[in-house]
Amino acid sequence: MLNEDTRKLILAHFWVAFIAFVAALALGEWQMYIRSPLHSWIQNPELYYRSVTAHGSAMGYVFPTLVAMGFGYAISELSLKQPLIGRRWAWAGLGLAIVGTLTAMIPVSMGLASVLYTFYPPMVGNPFYYIGIVLVVVGSWIWVALMSINLHAWKKANPGVPIPLPMFANVAAAYLWGWTSVGAAIELLFQIIPAALGLKTTIDAGLARVFFSWTLHAIVYFWLMPAYIAFYTLVPRAIGGRLYSDSMGRMAFILFLVFSMPIGIHHLFQDPQVGAGFKFLHAVFTGMVSIPTLLTVFTITASVEIAARLRGGKGALGWLKALPWSNPMMLAVAFSFIMLGFGGAGGLINMSYQLDFTVHNTQWITGHFHLIFGGAIVIMYFALAYDLWPHLTGKALKDIFLVKLQLWLWFVGMMALTFPWHWVGILGMPRRMAYFDYSNPAIAPEAFAVIMSFFGGLLLLVSGILFVVVLARGHLTEKITLPEFRFSQAVHEPSRLPIALNSFGLWLALMIGLTVVNYGLPISQLLAVKQTSVPVVPIGAAR
Amino acid sequence: MSLDTPQSQRAEAVAQKAEARWAIVVILIIALLLGMMTYMGLHWLTMPASRVETIDPSTLHLAGEFMEENLGSAVEPDGSVTVRLVGSQYSFTPQCLLIPTDTPITFRGTSSDVVHGFNIAKTNVNVMLVPGYIANFKTQFSKPADHVMPCHEFCGVGHAAMWAHVQVMDKTEFFKRAEKERRLSCVK
């Protein structure tokens, strides 16, 4: 059972996250409209890039971070069965995230920092944009520390007992984020903010891109963690099955922790400031990081099969019919896996750099990460919010039909949005364009795909609004007596675990060690090369 | 239902074997993909750019290989062609690249201000132009064709207007023209 104040804390995180999410969703759909043939050329493209900056910053830094934090606090209290330690610090972390979001969004909305959420120095915008992002990240670091503190308090009280899988995964996510955010933090604190404040007039754009790549890929695994925690610890229980393998879950989370960081240079395959050797090395490690996902797909499918067989499912594939398809969690995990399948296959293509030459920085990439993050991951955020909601409000969530409609709309909308993007990406359509000249015969055939994406986005917007409506209505029903919250049980619950599967020391050492090896040399080489700094180009300043 | 019956333990053993099989399949898939990538990289020389070269963007127009008169396509003594270009807010110089078929091509490019990049539509050519560094990309074109060449990295408010063109022309015609001009482009 959740403590009353912890409930408020988690609800506050979720509501801030979901409001930011719907606002950013609306901006995204406006962008889809404005750049489609349905609208004439935008008179002021600066407005478009303002919107992209706000959309990316809210969807990348605010929404998933606050979902992970809120879910993390819930996991800590529910799985360890001990009151959350440091609740006041947690509120302070949330406060920092809110203040940071507002600090960042004011200059963005004024057009003073239209640099997109990936920053792109030597363009440098208003310093408050970057300071705001830093505040959000510092707020999340409080969460990282609290997750570690709560786990250690529990371990002290329960020596030798296996850490419950949800908390093990949650703390892995916290450590992953703590370390991966360091790359962007270095870029912001030592390169961009001094330039934005006018203390420096030059910046090494190539080096900044290397620092950012350290964060840029692993941040996606941080976004993914709540979804994977839901796969392992909510889905089997919600659909009436058992988790097939507890230790496989632990291994998957450990592999993410170790392999998420030393791979980010695959974002820089076409960049001139990193040599071929490190590009190759990072490509190889990118291959490794697909292993935990492929293992997860197996384990969760096996767990789902257990549920089907417990419900009387028979045959090699006939058990699929016996699954509880009317259960929203079943629907969510099925949709998530379909999107993960396509998105993951796209990811393997991006990793193979000869293939990446065809699609780098085209709409294919936009399609890829919207399918993985917006599709496979965010649909599980919906599912975990629905699952937790009664335990947060103390009230029943009654709109099961609306919930299912919402999930269907999200799935269909995401497919309609991202498949055309992948297609035009292969044709060479670049990303981040405020408008296209559809009268150009080289671009005209792509117009239809852009219109399809617009309609996909429309379904997503409707679905997003429906999501917050269902949650808001969940506050309005009558109080109920709730059963105790349960996470999934494994077929064989571990009673003892090898120390490697029950602690983080070794894995954190590997995580840091591999990052230092794979990033240390490219960074120190760039630091050693002279005359790589270039003049800052101010954005949003009066000319 | 209890899950500790002999029957369920048998099921567990079956599942564990399936799991091990799957892990092997996964590792083989990844190894195959990485093997293909390595093979192509080494044998077809399709590796990402390897040398890190630097250049000062504030003086590149004054001297050296990226002065305006040196931009465009140049025939090298070994018969290959080097295409030099510069990205600036919000255009490429030259805006129209002229390239021969069936000839080894090396693109050399840089930026005079912010980060740019370009892809040549329906080809594998894809290059980032980061100020301070020189980008290299080797390729070959098999058919005469016209391609669009957009800037594909956000470079400021005018980014969406930054499109160039590439004209791939027959090799013999190209080299005939190259005898008369030191640098070739299709800028009119």
Image: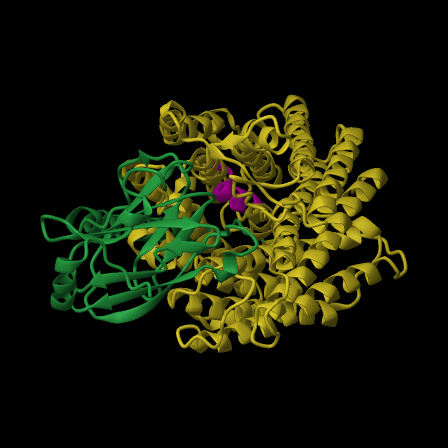
Q: Is residue A522 left or right of residue A503?
A: left
* Residue A152: percent from left, percent from top: 64, 24
Q: Is residue A239 left or right of residue B187?
A: right
- Answer with the quarter of the image where residue A350 lies: bottom left
Q: Nearer the viewer, residue A14 or B88?
A: B88
The residue under the point 68% across, 50% down is: A111
Examine the residues drawn in magenta and state their main secondary structure: helix
* Residue A380: percent from left, percent from top: 61, 56
Q: Residue furthest left?
A: B78
The residue under the point 64% across, 71% down is: A459
Q: Nearer the viewer, residue A266 or A50?
A: A50
Image colour for chain B is green
The residue under the point 23% across, 47% down is: B38
Image colour for chain A is yellow
* Residue B81: percent from left, percent from top: 18, 53
Q: Is residue A439 above or below residue A168?
A: below
Q: Is residue A79 left or right of residue B141?
A: right
Q: Nearer the viewer, residue A219 or A197?
A: A197
- Answer with the quarter of the image where residue A298 lies: bottom left
Q: Is residue A217 magenta?
A: yes
Q: Is residue A352 magenta?
A: no
Q: Is residue A360 visible?
A: no
Q: Which residues are magenta?
A: A214-222
Q: Nearer the viewer, residue A261 or A530?
A: A530
The residue under the point 67% across, 27% down is: A154
Quadrant of image for the C terminus of chain A:
top right
Q: Is residue A58 above or below residue A370?
A: above
- Answer with the quarter of the image where residue B99 lies: bottom left
* Residue B93: percent from left, percent from top: 36, 54
